[in-house]
Amino acid sequence: MTVSAAKPDSGGSYDFDVAVIGGGPGGYVAAIRAAQLGAKTALIEKESLGGTCLNVGCIPTKAVISSVALFRNMQNASAFGLSADNLAFDMAGISGGARKVVKQLVGGVGVLLKKNGIAHIRGLGSFVTANSIRVQGEAEQTITAKNVIIATGSVPSRPPIEGLDAFREVWTSDNAVFADRVPGKLLVVGAGAIGLEFAYIFNALGSSVTVVEMMPQILPAADSEATAELGKSLRKQGITIKTGTTLKKALVSGKQRRALISSGDGEETIDADVILLAAGRKPSTEGLDLDAIGVKMNRAAIAVDANYRTSVPGVYAIGDCIGEPLLAHAASAEGEAAAETIMGHPRTVNYHAMPAAVYTHPELASVGDTEAQAREKHADVVVGKFAFAINGRALGGRETEGFVKLVVSEKHGEILGAHIVGPHASDLLAECATAIASEITVDELIHSVHAHPTLSEVVMEAAHDARGRCIHKV
């Protein structure tokens, strides 16, 4: 749409009460919440609504993972008393299904904006002044807003590795999610959530996958016992994982493509048809002209206070562009908090209760402190743990890998952290995140009756174990 420009550099009227730059899970949620609270709101987005998460990230990868998980289960049909012959997969069909899901949800975001009376302005937004935004789209225009929320997200990092440009077959998560083929040999650089999920996908579809991670463990920020369990499972599936290892150089000789990797044991060369860079993402702030209005930065990220105010009055920032945690649901929570602050209802986000999940099979999900972090802060830490292998529902579903681990303050029963490796871990974690956010004690969790037979009983059993009174643990 086109909006007539106003020029209220100080005082006067504005085109909008709130303008949001970026239509990802942080931006569109912020815009909707501001509109719900009575603000005349605009959303500026240069590409498709939904941002990275909806278009090339969280949503399509989970759609692809669902296809892959079903394919793996069909290969194991005999365990369920079934038979499935001549199994095959179609990459075009897998990608097409994911695109269909994306299209439906992108359309849904558009409907939500319209329902809430939000002006959707298509184009690239940049600052002229703190209250004036130039939008370069089909036709250049300038809009004004009393308050602006920056929600421009992040982009994949490309480390300066020798030979990458000549290697040609270098992917990031943005193009790997809709890949039209399965590489024979895939080298994944980075064992964070993105790297492990794509390693799982392509290994299940037949790639020979090697993952290199420069830190001593996969998922470096996660609980070490949980990551060890997940790593054991992924290796069992056939994925080669090399921690404490870096990619030094990409090598091309005729049709042969190889990679030189380095670890404490020395250097080695491995074959690699494709290199997938999954070693992190960086805030996307280029083109905003933040210097023009004096926004302070925290290295590459936009610096904000607890209510997401930048150094410039009336300008806020949320989501990946302000740095860790780079999570879609964190951006959404920050977007709501920023909108509420603007509209006179200041609110902060509880990052201690911020869940995180990795959607491999088994899944890994966590919230709160790791065991090591908890022991650094508290002298009375106890751990409750229960395995899925003892749970009736897990046995019935033939998904018995992993456990629930609760990190607890023995004196007060406070749940300091929860770490789950196993089936539907990302869903089961919600109970733990709610418990931490609401300060529900492990004793109250014990006394909350869980339906039988369900996977959620494993959470209850881990709570029992933290108090040394587990019924079903041998």
Image (spheres, grey):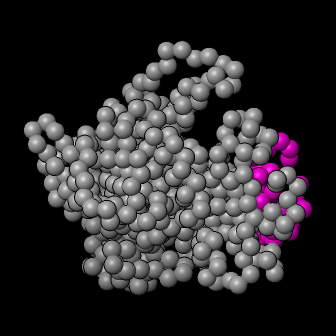
**In the rendering, at what x and y percent does residue 142 appear?**
31, 65
Please state which of residues 329 and 11 is positioned toward the viewer in this rendering: 329
Image quadrant in which you'd find residue 461: bottom right
Kindly identify the residue that appears in the image at 54 percent across and 31 percent down: 72
Whether residue 12 is visible: no
> Horizontally, is 260 left or right of 335 in the view?
left
> Horizontally, is 31 left or right of 383 in the view?
left
Kindly identify the residue that appears in the image at 66 percent across and 19 percent down: 82
Total numbered badges shown on the rendered structure: 0
What range is drawn magenta here?
437-464
The magenta stretch spans residue 393: no
**In the rendering, at what x and y percent does residue 219 appear?**
48, 61
The magenta stretch spans residue 439: yes
Q: Residue furthest top?
A: 85
**In the rendering, at what x and y percent does residue 299 appear?**
33, 78
Kindly identify the residue that appears in the image at 46 percent across and 62 percent down: 217
Kindly identify the residue that appears in the image at 27 percent across and 61 percent down: 266
Image quadrant in which you'd find residue 78: top right
Image quadrant in which you'd find residue 2: bottom left
**In the rendering, at what x and y percent does residue 202 appear?**
41, 38
Residue 388 to residue 395: above or below: below
Q: Which residue lies furthest to the front in this view?
A: 265
> Horizontally, is 158 left or right of 11 in the view?
left
> Horizontally, is 159 left or right of 131 in the view?
left
Please state which of residues 306 and 381 is positioned toward the viewer in this rendering: 381
Residue 90 to residue 378: above or below: above
Residue 458 to residue 412: above or below: above
Whether residue 420 is visible: yes
Q: Which residue lies furthest to the left in this view?
A: 254
Residue 217 to residue 259: above or below: below
